[in-house]
Amino acid sequence: MSADWRRREALKIAKNRTQVDALRGLDAALRAEEAAEPRDADAADAVSRGVAAVQQVHHYLSPANLRTDGFLRGEMDPATGFVRHATLATFPQLAAIGVGDADLAHYLRHSQVVELDAAGTAVRPKRAWRAFAGRAPVAPHWGEGRGPPPPPPPVATALIHRMGGEALT
């Protein structure tokens, strides 16, 4: 083996090592970049949480729910109809979704059903909020200071007698 051949082989090896080292550095940089960026699964999870939170707020502020939800009606500002995000965040189903106030405002900004106040800290229904804002909460359920339930209709009383029971009066 000649000295030139050895020198050329040594240069090839050194060149390959340099390339390998460069590839290792590039691989490490790409891994660090990937770790800093949200993964597709994280992004999809954030989107699904956002959709769930928007649907839950739409339910809370729907006319059907506001008719029966005296607590939420009581939390609405009588003049503007807005409910603070902090209040909604205390509701168990919305809290379980795990969306913060800033994220909730971001997701609700494009809603066709509700609108945000100028500061982005409160939300109200876009339509018919005046019918619910400032209304007194509904009376508590039976047995909570409202008295006994009404007597059953006569047909139910007759069925109860036929079955050998006593009618509720």
Image: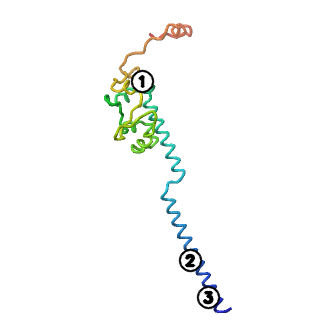
Q: Residues within 10 Å of mark 1 (few under 14, many from 20)?
A: some
On screen, residue 43 versus residue 80, left or right, reads: right
Nearer to me, 80 or 1 = 80
Nearer-the-camera pick, 82 or 71 = 82
- At label 3, which amino acid type do we have? Arg
Q: Earlier in the sequence, mark 3 or mark 1?
A: 3
Image quadrant where one finds the N terminus: bottom right
Quarter holding the C terminus?
top left
Secondary structure of the residue carrying tag 1 is helix
Going by the numbered disc 1, the residue's amino acid type is Arg
How far is the residue under mark 3 from the one under mark 2?
16 Å
Distance from Cα at disc 3 to Cα at disc 1 = 89 Å
Packing grade of label 3 (10 A; few <14, some 14-19, many >=20) is few
For marks 2 and 1 on the same chain, the one whose residue lies earlier in the sequence: 2
In the rendered image, the residue lying farthest to the right is 1
The residue under label 1 is: 67
Residue at left offset 56%, top offset 8%: 162
Work out whether residue 65 or residue 77 is closer to the camera in this orientation and state it. 77
Report if the CB atoms under discs 2 and 1 are less than 8 Å apart. no
Q: Please, what secondary structure does the residue beneath circle 2 have?
A: helix
Q: Is mark 3 in CB contact (under 8 Å) with mark 1? A: no
Q: Residue at x 42, y 34 (%)?
A: 114
According to the image, label 2 marks what residue?
A: 18
Closer to the eye: label 2 or 1: 2
- Residue 96 at x, y percent in the picture: 45, 40
Q: Which mark is residue 7?
A: 3
